[in-house]
Amino acid sequence: YFFFEASISCVLPYMALYYKELGFRNQTIGLLSSLCTFVSILGAPFWGAIADKTRRLSETMLLTFAFGVIFRMSLLFVAG
């Protein structure tokens, strides 16, 4: 978990520059940058409730980790 969060903190500050290089407008970059926080605010209680209801904490954490990896790996396929 520590290394996952550390990797996010290394990449996240440069995402705005990446979006700018792709030609996004400043308003769009601001929206995309704030989405991470917004999704975390909504997603954490949602996945926590799922884990509590199913009593499968390890599987739920693995699932959310896998979704995060898939999402971040999909950025490799963005043409730019």
Image (cartoon, helix red, strand yellow):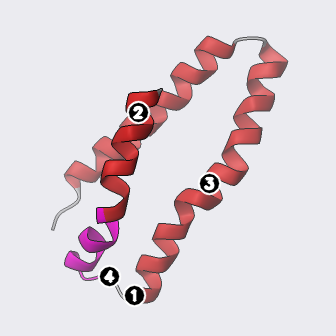
Marks 2 and 1, Cα distance to the nearest angstrom? 28 Å
Q: Is residue 39 left or right of residue 17?
A: right
Q: Percent x, y for residue 60? A: 62, 21
Marks 4 and 2, Cα distance to the nearest angstrom? 27 Å
Q: Percent x, y for residue 35? A: 55, 64
**Residue depicted at 63% across the width and 50% down the height:** 40
Task: Quadrant for the C terminus, please.
Answer: bottom left
Name the residue beneath numbered marker 1: 26
- Going by the numbered disc 4, the residue's amino acid type is Phe
Q: Does residue 47 lie above or below 20 as drawn?
A: above
In the displayed image of the protein, which residue is found farthest to the right? 53
- Going by the numbered disc 3, the residue's amino acid type is Val
Q: Which span of residues is magenta-colored?
A: 14-23
Name the residue beneath numbered marker 4: 24
Marks 3 and 1, Cα distance to the nearest angstrom? 20 Å
Q: Percent x, y for residue 14? A: 29, 64
Which quadrant holds residue 28? bottom left
Name the residue beneath numbered marker 2: 4
Q: Residues within 10 Å of mark 3 (few under 14, many from 20)?
A: few
**Residue depicted at 81% across the width and 20% down the height:** 52
Which quadrant holds residue 71? top left
User: In terms of secondary structure, where does tag 4 sit?
Assistant: loop
> Magenta stretch containing residue 19, yes or no?
yes
- If you read the primary sequence from the N terminus, does the residue marked by circle 3 or circle 2 appear first? 2
- Going by the numbered disc 2, the residue's amino acid type is Phe
Q: Is residue 67 left or right of residue 44?
A: left
Q: Does residue 28 lie above or below 19 as drawn?
A: below
Name the residue beneath numbered marker 3: 39
- Decide whether the magenta segment is chiefly helix, strand or loop: helix
